[in-house]
Amino acid sequence: MQKCEVEPGRVNSPMAKTANPDKKLAVSSRGRDKPGVAVTTRALAFLRRLRHADARSLASAVLNRLWPARARLAPVILAATRGQTGLEIGGPSRVFMDGKILPVYAAAVRVDNVNFASQTAWEAGLREDGDFVFHPAKPPGRQFLREATALHGIADAGYDFLLSSHCLEHVANPLAALREWHRVVRPGGHLVLILPDPVHTFDHRRPVTTLAHLQEDFARGTGEDDLTHLDEILTLHDLRRDPWAGSAAAFAGRSRHNAENRCLHHHVFDGALQRAVLEACGWTVTATERVRPLHLLALARRPAPGDNSFPAAAGV
């Protein structure tokens, strides 16, 4: 499972839907290595925002261009991932690239990847056991085609860390995903979880999802064909903050086929819910941070037996 946030600098296919700021360009694996393609697509994305975004979104985009954000937690997260092997759900993500707020790709020895299909709104030409190019100076990682909630064939405790940026909100059953991610990270390993802050996105009109609702989804085994929140989304989604969504009719049409394109935000998280779902799934939340322009960042840890390090820190 992967995300459909169109962050500035990321251009999606016609299925895609958001205006959101720190993700890899949605180009084929061949086009991924061409700087000219990246520059052109970033420029087109920014020009589209200038034309269609509301005043608040536009001001945020300009501010982030002139004064790029930096994460206070970056040194801690880089120390936890340096020289380690990780797995990313979704991606590749601009936020983890060189010069961005969390340059984890440069710190890690290897990063493998999970995407839900060979062709998505963000990537094309993916294949099982193919290459995942996460950093130009490092050997590629391994590509898996899996659902975020069912990482079959991936060993228990096989990774030192797991990355997820603007992905979990697109998963119909977040608790199932977080439990599965917990399984594949070794005791003492880490999860870097980034979610969109609804205050600064097109979800700002929607209510924050409750933990009880997510627990019900888990108990029912809710799958990716679930459209429980469709009416709410179509009513409250702010198209002014989503310049890639197109018209209301186009957005509604694509949303009804979410099982194929995965562009909807099933759920809306704030900082408190982000912490609650992590703790409910056995993770120890070590630190949280709001990062401009719209990121809710959490660093969590899979506890090791008898380990009392990394006490939970206040945040959000």
Image: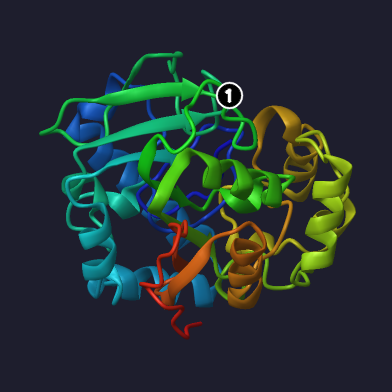
Specify the quadrant of the image occupied by residue 70.
Answer: bottom left
Instruction: Establish if 130 lies above or below 31.
Output: above
Q: Residue at the left extreme?
A: 137
Place of residue 142 in the rendered image (x, y in percent of width and height, measured from the top left): 34, 23
**Image point 83% across, 41% down: which residue?**
222
Residue 92 in view:
no
Q: Quadrant of residue 305?
A: bottom left
- Position of residue 21 in the picture relative to residue 182 (left or right): left
SS class of the residue under badge 1? loop
Along the line of sight, which residue is nearer the eye, 91 or 151? 151
Tell me if mark 1 has few (under 14), some (14-19) or many (20+) residues whose alpha carbon lies within 10 angstroms of its own. Answer: few
Residue nearest the viewer, comparing 62 with 27: 27
Residue 151 visible in the displayed image:
yes
Single out the residue that lies furthest toward the front: 306
**In the visual, does 315 lie left or right of 38?**
right
Q: Which residue is mark 1?
A: 152
Color theme of the render: rainbow
